[in-house]
Amino acid sequence: VAGAGAARAERTRQEHRELRLDAMKAVRTVLQSLHGSIVAPIAVRTVSAGGGDDKDSATAGRTVSTGGSDKDLNGTGPPSTVNIDTNGNSNSNSTLVQVFDSKKRRREEEARVILRFNQKPSSGISYAGQCGHIDPDDAVDVAQYLLKMKDSFEKTQIGEYLGREPDYQGGFALKVLHAYVDQLNFAGMVFDDAIRFYLSGFRLPGEAQKIDRIMEKFAERYSLQNPTVFVNADVAFILAFSIIMLNTDLHNPSIKEERRMTKEGFIRNNRGISDGGDLPEEFLTAIFDRIRENAISLKEDDEARERTGEGKEEGASTLSPSVLNPSAFFSNHYVEMDRTRETNFQKERDQIVRNTESLLKRKKRHHHPSKAPSASFGAAASRSSVKFVRTEDSGLQDEYVSPMFEVTWAPALAVFSTAMESANGTAG
């Protein structure tokens, strides 16, 4: 029995050793590819932009496919190609490198737009215009951009911008508000569900005048698309404001239970608003019941409460007053908490990257100047029958290799560290 146990232990050790070796080989191959993309040549060189020799002239006048995705940046369109003229020069409309560069640049620009918008909405919109993402002087274009980026922008800032004064920026912000609402479709929607949908894209500002402007345009749009629900847009506006106050009254934990609005009180408050008449009682009762069962709130607030253990199953009494205060959708300390955590994480990550980069640069300077890494690496690559792409062969630049290194350096370090620790003091 003891001998069988020892044999199993030896087999397990051997299997683990082989697994570690396979992992090391995989990591080494990844690192070789990154290194080879800069210094290791390939046998078949791509068409030189300078052109001039017989090999280059043979390809002149032809269109060479890049062999990548058959879609453009928007996901549709013809395959990416490189047009080569009679001089051997490549006129690329959408090469793979250019596509990658364009997407990378777009993401970086959008990140800066988000940062500027969250600090000052007008600054973010102006910068998006400078980057060519939108026409900053076209209210419709700006409104569509706000809708597209509503999950990226701070919803508090979106609401603040949409609720700006009529004379702000010469009335441009008000035009954006109108264009924003005109992009939404409320046809056939229940009135309070339309309010939920409308307020899902931004957080209402705290000033009553801003709320008036935002909800007045909503009432106008809803009445236009649902002409049989109310006699005019004023009725929709008054009821919408009343529903917001009801939502606050029913779900604000700072209000005592005996002081909360009752169904009878809600119906009484909305008497005579329909051009001197009353709205159907069953209509108001249904609205009251839905608001009581399901508070109007942003999904970000709901998710934040769930992450902090303040879900609905714990009851409304555990909710922080800053989550459902009288503004109902206004300020939220969870947003600030998330922003702080994200900022601290980014700072720590940047510091790790800077330290690693500094260490690698110091190691590189310590190498002997007469050493020829490209030649030695080329020999190693040829022995293993592995070919890599150089920057000068493919049109790649260091900026494309750097993101790959950022992704692989930490796992590579972890693998090597584990392997070295496991093999410490052992032979093989």
Image (tube, rainbow, N blue to C red):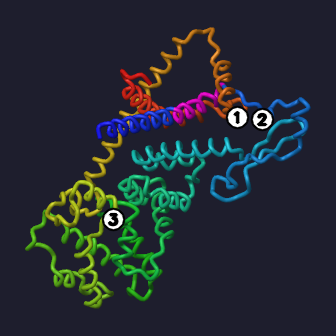
State whether residue 54 is above or below residue 194: above
Residue type pointed to by label 1? Gly
**Numbered range of the magenta stretch:** 25-39
Residue 27 on the magenta span: yes
Q: Is residue 207 visible?
A: no
- Write down the quadrant of residue 369 in the picture: top right
- Residue situated in front as seen by the camera: 318 or 283: 318
Q: Quadrant of the N terminus?
A: top left
Task: Please tell me whether mark 3 or mark 2 is closer to you in this view.
Answer: 2
Disc on the earlier residue, 2 or 1: 2
Expressed as whole percent of the image width and height from the top left, the position of residue 248 reads: 22, 68
State whether residue 222 is above or below residue 150: below
| CB atoms of marks 2 and 1 within 8 Å | yes
Which residue has dot 3 on it?
211
Q: Is residue 150 left or right of residue 32?
A: left
Which residue has dot 1 on it?
395
| CB atoms of marks 3 and 2 within 8 Å | no
| Residue 408 - label | none
Disc on the earlier residue, 3 or 2: 2
The 10 Å Cα crowd at callout 2, few under 14, some 14 to 19, many 20 or more, is: few
| Residue 46 - label | 2
x 53%, y 60%: residue: 139
Expressed as whole percent of the image width and height from the top left, the position of residue 417 reads: 40, 28
Identify the element where label 1 is drawn: loop
Q: Is residue 130 left or right of residue 386?
A: left
> Could you give the CA–CA distance between mark 1 and mark 3, rounded to whole angstroms?
54 Å
